[in-house]
Image: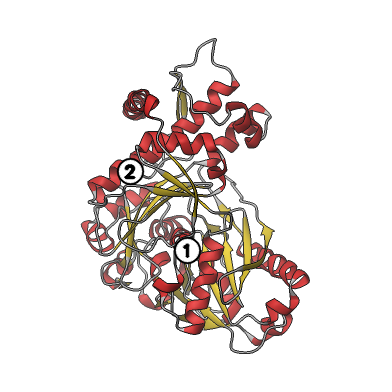
Amino acid sequence: MYLGLDLGTSGVKAMLIDGDQRVVGSATGGLDVSRPHPGWSEQDPAHWIHATQEAVGALKAAHPAELAAVRGIGLSGHMHGATLIDASDAVLRPCILWNDTRSFAEAAALDADPRFRALTGNIVFPGFTAPKLAWVKNNEPDVFSRVAKVLLPKDYLRLWLSGEHISEMSDSAGTSWLDTGKRAWSQELLAATDLSEEQMPRLVEGTEQGGTLRAELAAEWGMGSGVVIAGGAGDNAASACGMGTVAEGQAFVSLGTSGVLFAANGSYLPKPESAVHAFCHALPNTWHQMGVILSATDALNWHAKVTGRTAGELSAEVGDVLHAPTGVTFLPYLSGERTPHNDAKIRGAFIGLGHESGRAELTQAVMEGVTFAIRDSLEALKSAGTSISRVTAIGGGSRSRYWLASIATALDMPVDIPADGDFGAAFGAARLGLIAATGADPLTVCTAPQTAETVEPVADLTVAYETAYHRYRALYPAIRGI
């Protein structure tokens, strides 16, 4: 048996699979996000441990014999978080999360240093880890002076699981300290933020062993000795492993809290000025590109909260049959935007409201706004030299047939719906645990699921969608000025 642990923003998911990659069971422990000031987003790492115990405890109650047979554990987690620990491995402050934008000034200052784009292949975004440490140095100097290690969120879980300071390439590529082409820490970039390689975890590939489970936890969970912990992956790379998106030309679109258009690459193809993320993949000698939007289902959840309905009720009100855009446009920049704008301060807007604009029309506009933001990412990927002809849809938002038809029409490409099953980050993490424990060929393990259905572009609405997209594109520069 193999266990995947996925540390998400809203919870930790634990999934058990067997040697044939059949899902035996899964469970989740819940998490909350603290937002003490506008633009801030934090979590207490102790809550990650509690949520993991809750999730694994539920698996143990339901599948004790299977959990006892676990031989490998894989880790996945939300990226970019700054988890700061001292020399005794005590947490120094709440973890600053991926969607925290307080360090926009520090990010701009680092990004102005040409070495960062040249070595990392990416813009220094405010959500990345390095500018967060620069912010801590500027605003919490006592905390900064006591930092012994900087860990990414899943790697803090690894520290608790194994007692070791280890990370891997896909997650570390989102720190702004990794030489992404060489797959190694850059001493030059670390020094630019007054840090050293001694304050970083040791790096392994995602498919390699990255620690073993502590005896105390193995006993508590009923496991034997020597349970291998894989290097693992950042959440998007882990999802790609779960979806089998590991070879050149394969791509998926994720409609989760944030939105991602992810394309696997057989070589390193950076183009920082496009605001496309060029990161290491979880498999050795592979890379990937991503366009990232900060509010996908989060935008619909915000709209649901404002209207007093659930996201499911709003989606049902719109229906499954795609409509032509109404003229109401929504800009989904509720917490700033990454691809293609790299703008932490921009905020969302409805444009074109009229007396005829009811709740359903606004819901449709929210979905279209997220769709057009994903189209922005497609255009950015094209500019960076990546060509894709179809995508597979994952994430909670992919349950909306309307949303998938909207994306297919805006991207003008088929959207595949995988066969029933959970092929997300927890499954990908479990696959990495299997590879690390058995030495199996990663490409043999990380295969794509069967396609249950394909959503094609709605040809009659292609022109209307193209017109609406160009209207959407014109609005960002218009509102940025105000």
> What sort of colour scheme is used for the picture?
secondary structure
The image shows a total of numbered marks equal to: 2
SS class, disc 1: helix
Quarter of the picture holding the C terminus:
top left
2 and 355: which is toward the camera: 2
Would residue 341 be visible to someone looking at this image?
no
Extreme residue in the top direction: 355
Q: Residues within 10 Å of mark 1 (few under 14, many from 20)?
A: many
SS class, disc 2: helix
Please state the horizontal and vertical placement of residue 333, each as a whole percent of the image.
45, 36
Image quadrant in which you'd find residue 412: top left
| Disc marking residue 18 | none
Q: Which kind of residue does numbered mark 1 sit on?
A: Ala
Q: Which residue is mark 1?
A: 238
Q: Is residue 410 above or below residue 231?
A: above
Q: From mark 2 to mark 1, how far is it between C-alphas?
A: 21 Å
Please state the horizontal and vertical placement of residue 178, each as a whole percent of the image.
33, 67
463 and 382: which is toward the camera: 463
Quarter of the picture holding the N terminus:
bottom right
Please state the horizontal and vertical placement of residue 385, each as a whole percent of the image.
22, 51
Q: Which kind of residue does numbered mark 2 sit on?
A: Leu
In the image, is 242 to the left or to the right of 222? left
Q: Is residue 121 above or below residue 406?
A: below
Residue at 66% of width from left, 62% of height from top?
A: 47
Residue at 57% of width from left, 47% of height from top?
A: 396
Q: Residues within 10 Å of mark 2 (few under 14, many from 20)?
A: many
In the image, is 476 to the left or to the right of 163? left
N-terminal of the two: label 2 or label 1?
1
Please state the horizontal and vertical placement of residue 317, each as a whole percent of the image.
62, 27
| Disc marking residue 378 | 2
Extreme residue in the right direction: 61
